[in-house]
Structures are given as structure tokens and as C-alpha cells.
Image (spheres, rainbow, N blue to C red):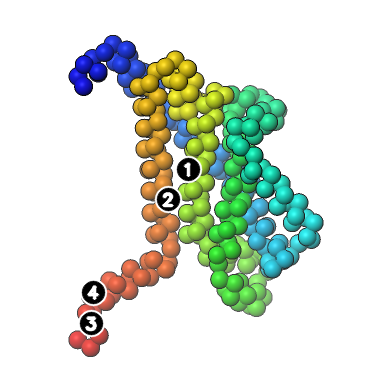
Amino acid sequence: MLEFFSDPKVAEQIDYLVRHVPFAVWETVYTTVVASVFAYLLGLPLGVLLVVGARDGIRPLPLPLMQAINTVINLLRSMPFLILMVLVMPLSRVIVGTTIGTVGILVPLTAASFPFVARLVEGSLREMDRGVLEAAQAMGCSTLQVVWKVLLPESLPSLLSGFTTAFVTILGYGAMSGFIGGGGLGSMSLQYAWNNRKMVVLYGAVIVLVILVQIFQSVGSHLSTRMDRRVTDRGSARSSRKKTGPAGK
């Protein structure tokens, strides 16, 4: 083991990791966060629209419109990310002026992610008890009030869990963007390490990426559980029983 680390080539790669990993992590997190924000700015309203405007929704929209929205979302979701990334390059050049680097990859990441986000949001909202929505409508709430004050708040734990899934997925997409020089840990792994056979750098970057995924997944799962009132209520009930003891004592 000591001979391995004392090898000049290995030592050089370890030194490269120490010097470049912090900035690569920053680029990875930056692109993931920004792309997630844009993906939710597009995907969240679409997901709400898919539920509210459905035939059994609280405000049904024309069937041709809903079919067109579903077709576009399904088309974008079915396209592999690497292919979509290449197809969106001209649009990326028009919007941000480049197709490479952390800025150039934001447009492809958003285009690949917002349909996925829309489906996650749709699934989360459909889990909600329809009786609550009907009660809100019976009280005279408008569609906007039902969505903003009932639908979204009641579905928040599931939406947060979906956000965690989307965030980790976008993080993986960002790593794959290293094929076109997207920056971050993906570019370090594919453009530098793999092409130059720097295996220590490759495995080091992959390990850091796995650690990032574990951190974000754990934090998201924890917050989702904390905000789920069903879990909180069960925990409070158990605490109360422990304090008061069995009934009748």
C-alpha cells in the first residue's frame, strides 16, 4: 500500500485531486442547484396543470390541450439525455452564448429535467385525498386558492421527496455532461481522467460524486420525514403514551 502511494504517478494524481476537487465540487453543485431551480420553475406549474386541468380535476381544461402537454412531456422524457443534450446545443448557444462549461450545460439540463419534475409533481399531487379538495371547493374557494392553500401545502412532504429525487437525478445528468465539457466532477472524470488514463483521479472523482449524492439524499429524506405530519403525529402519540403509561394506571 505504501509503495502504491509513493509511486510518482499516483502522487501526482492525488495532488491533482487535492488542488482541483474543491472547484469541481463547486461547479457540480452550482449547475445542479441552478438547473433544479429552472426545472421547477417550468415543471411545477406543468405538474399542477396536469392535475388541475385533467378530466377529473378541479378545473378541467380542453382535452386537445391536455393531450398536447402530455405528448410534449412524454417526448422529452423518452429521449436519452446525451442525445437531447446534443439536440439542444443550438438553443443553448442562442440563450447563453455557449454550449460548454457550467453555463452552457444549464439549458440542456433544464430541458431534460423539467418534464421529469412535472411528472414527479403530478404524482405527488394525485396522492392527496380528494375529499380535502372537495371540502375546499364546497367552502367556496377559488381554483387558485385551492391550489395555493390546500393542494400544495398538503402535498408538501411528497413534493419535497420528489425534489430530492429530481435533484439527485439532475446531479447525475450534470456528471454525464462531462462528455461535452460540461465542467465539474463529470468533466474531471471523463475529459481529463478517462482520456488520459488517470485512474486515481477517475475513482477519486467518482467517490466524491457518490458522497455528494448520499449527502443530498439523506438531507432530503430527513426533511421530508420531518414535514410529514403523519409521521410526526405517530411519534408524538408514542411519546405521550410513554409519559402517561398504560391506560388506567
* 202 up-or-down from 47: above or below: above
Classify residue 226 as left or right of residue 102. Answer: left
Question: From mark 1 to mark 2, how far is it between C-alphas?
Answer: 10 Å
Please report contact status of discs 1 and 2: CB closer than 8 Å, yes or no: yes
Where residue 210 sits, quadrant-wise, is: top left
Of the two numbered discs 1 and 2 in the rendering, the one whose residue sits closer to the viewer? 1
Question: From mark 2 to mark 4, how far is it between C-alphas?
Answer: 29 Å
Badge 4 marks a residue whose secondary structure is: helix
Where does label 1 land, which residue? 168
Amino acid of disc 2 = Gly
* 171 up-or-down from 138: above or below: above
Where does label 3 land, which residue? 246
Of the two numbered discs 4 and 1 in the rendering, the one whose residue sits closer to the viewer? 1
Identify the residue at horizontal 67%, vertical 58% (top origin): 50
The front one of 30 and 105 is 105
Circle 2 Cα neighbour tier, 10 Å, few/some/many (<14 / 14–19 / ≥20): many
Amino acid of disc 4 = Lys
Amino acid of disc 1 = Val
